[in-house]
Image (tube, rainbow, N blue to C red):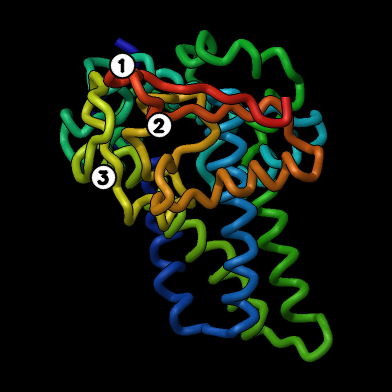
């Protein structure tokens, strides 16, 4: 079985998480509008472009293709979310789709709501450099860029943190208060909230919400997770059509990450965008789907 409960707490992960949560709370005492603005920009880079568009829809499911420099740049953005390197993230997610809500699923609520949200990382057997995951990511393992990025995935965020502190203190009109504010808001608070949003995709969208498709798992379409994550919460849609770059399949299902992919397509930077959804044509069989390839 790929994922197991070890019974041993992963202290190497616990201590950083405690520190990040405490410093995230302290950010509330160092508010600046510029810090909030930088946090918003880095949220888009790390959570929307990085996790949603790159790690998930491009690297995991290959829902669209881009030039390598775009692909690598978006993967670099994903490391700003501090959710691990691409080999670990993609490997875990591909494993999740293989055994969704079955024994071995890395983070199924059937093993407990807390387990699916965070417990699987604190007590689970899978870790950032687990060789078990290698079989799920041969495409990434062949590329030196992803091997290096997976090993040093924490470096971009650390570099950004020191750069923000330096710029906030020494730029024109700067101060120590501003530098600390920028770091607390754009690094610690933003990352902590982003982690819980991604974890909510693992937990909440397999417990609460509606089901458009009768999939063989517990996936749900959860509107509030979708709004927070940029569209990742339309999870039942996604599990029914995992290759689709579009997760929102109705006009009211806001899918910001898909809009970003379409923007890349209009700019000539994304090709072969796979769009799947229910077939509403007259005479279509129940449960049948349509597939379109945009900018092919």
Secondary structure of the residue carrying tag 1 is loop
Q: Quadrant of residue 150?
A: top right
Quarter of the picture holding the N terminus: top left
Q: Nearer the viewer, mark 1 or mark 2?
A: 1
Q: Nearer the viewer, mark 2 or mark 3?
A: 2
Rendered residue at 61%/10% (across/down): 138
Which comes before the other along the chain, label 2 or label 3? 3
Q: Is residue 90 above or below residue 114?
A: above
Give the Cα distance between marks 1 and 2. 20 Å
Task: Decide if residue 128 is in sight here.
Answer: yes
Q: Residues within 10 Å of mark 2 (few under 14, many from 20)?
A: many
Rendered residue at 69%/71% (across/down): 165
Rendered residue at 51%/42% (across/down): 83
Rendered residue at 52%/8% (across/down): 135
Residue denoted by label 2: 238
Residue denoted by label 1: 285
Q: Quadrant of residue 59?
A: top right
Task: Give the residue furthest to the bottom.
Answer: 173
Which comes before the other along the chain, label 3 or label 1? 3
Quarter of the picture holding the C terminus: top right
280, 32: nearer the viewer: 280
Left or right, 89 with respect to 143, comes to left
Residue denoted by label 3: 204
């Amino acid at each position: 079985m790929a994922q197991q409960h070890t019974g041993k707490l992963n202290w190497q992960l616990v201590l950083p998480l405690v520190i990040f949560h405490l410093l995230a709370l302290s950010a509330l005492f160092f508010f600046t509008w510029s810090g909030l603005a930088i946090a918003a920009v880095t949220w888009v880079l790390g959570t929307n472009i990085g996790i949603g568009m790159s790690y998930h829809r491009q690297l995991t499911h290959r829902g669209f293709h881009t030039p390598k420099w775009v692909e690598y740049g978006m993967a670099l953005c994903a490391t700003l979310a501090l959710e691990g390197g691409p080999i670990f993230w993609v490997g875990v997610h591909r494993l999740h789709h293989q055994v969704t809500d079955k024994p071995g699923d890395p983070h199924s609520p059937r093993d407990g709501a807390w387990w699916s949200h965070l417990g699987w990382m604190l007590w689970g057997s899978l870790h950032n450099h687990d060789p078990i995951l290698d079989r799920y990511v041969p495409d990434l393992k062949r590329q030196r860029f992803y091997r290096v990025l997976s090993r040093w995935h924490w470096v971009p965020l650390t570099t950004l943190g020191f750069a923000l502190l330096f710029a906030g203190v020494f730029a024109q009109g700067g101060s120590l208060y501003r530098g600390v504010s920028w770091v607390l808001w754009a690094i610690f608070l933003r990352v902590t909230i982003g982690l819980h949003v991604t974890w909510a995709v693992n937990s909440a969208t397999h417990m609460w919400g509606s089901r458009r498709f009768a999939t063989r798992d517990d996936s749900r379409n959860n509107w509030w997770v979708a709004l927070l994550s940029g569209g990742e919460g339309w999870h039942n849609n996604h599990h029914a059509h995992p290759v689709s770059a579009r997760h929102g399949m109705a006009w009211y299902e806001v899918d910001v990450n898909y809009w970003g992919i379409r923007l890349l397509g209009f700019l000539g930077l994304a090709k072969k965008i796979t769009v799947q959804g229910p077939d509403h044509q007259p005479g279509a069989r129940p449960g049948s789907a349509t597939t379109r390839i945009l900018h092919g």
